[in-house]
Image (cartoon, rainbow, N blue to C red):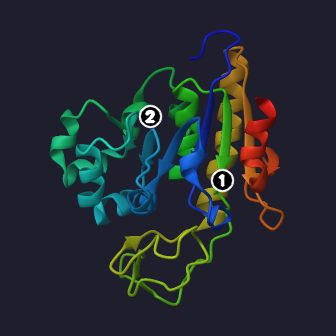
Amino acid sequence: MSEEGQVRKCTVIGNGATLKDFDFTKIEDETIGMCLAYRHWEKIDWYPDYYVCVDKVVLHSNYKDIEKMIVDDKCKGGYLLSRSILEDCPELAENEKVIFFEDFKRQRGNPFRYLVDWCSGSVSVLFSVILGFNDIHIMGIDCNYKEFLPETEELEDGTLKITKTPETNPNYFVDDYQREGDIYNKPNCEKVHIPSWEHIVFIITGYTRLNNLYMNVTCWTDDEVKGLTKYFTKENIKDYFVEDIKKE
């Protein structure tokens, strides 16, 4: 963890529509990104310091791209993944920058052991705590998914498939975040995402108090989207860089 009295800032970047037109390249602090956003990062030639994806369906559907990103060492800090990716990319087990979510879950003293429900977003925030960050800024986690898009079909196993790259995707900050052929889980925001955040708040609160740690968590969103403001202090996403200027 961070040294006593030291404030370490990290920005956890989700993929929600509140980040439309946001310039990630201007972020000066360390960052954690997730899931399919690497498609946009490739376009703008920018990658976060850390990458997280613990969604087994997304990992299997997109393992070639994710493996290439890791082999090319795009995220200099490291990668937190589900071990399920080893079914497609067994060689990643030997990559020193790849950490596995399931190992954290089994590790004594690790707050990941107390997770009951989770998603890549909530896991990313808890990962930032493990990394020693104590001034955590969350953006783009809007928790207002449209469950079914017109370009979506449901498969026999209950997963969803994108049949055509959407011209407009209300769930994400870029319309081609999901592309033709992608297979993914139903968002199930109320049953999966929201409970996962309730668990994260409980775990972080308990972990920091037991260890006498300073912790500040801020949610950056806009006036139309509540996002995670039920759990964390709210700030307007338009003021993200303004706050940095004020601190100089």
**Quadrant location of the N terminus in the rendered image:** top right
> What residue is disc 1 on?
195
User: Badge 1 local density, few (<14 within 10 Å), some, or many (20+)?
Assistant: some
The amino acid type found where label 1 is placed reads: Pro
Residue 19: in sight, yes or no? Answer: yes
Q: Is residue 25 left or right of residue 66?
A: right
Q: Secondary structure at mark 1?
A: helix
- 106 relative to 53, above or below: above
Q: Quadrant of residue 165?
A: bottom left
In the rendered image, residue 103, in percent from the top left (x then y), is placed at: 37, 33
Q: Nearer the viewer, residue 58 or 137?
A: 137
Mark 1–mark 2 Cα distance, whole angstroms, equals 18 Å
> What residue is disc 2 on?
105
- 103 relative to 222, above or below: above
Q: Which mark is residue 142?
A: none
Q: Secondary structure at mark 2?
A: helix
Q: Residue at x 52, y 76 (%)?
A: 175
**Quadrant location of the C terminus in the rendered image:** top right
The amino acid type found where label 2 is placed reads: Lys
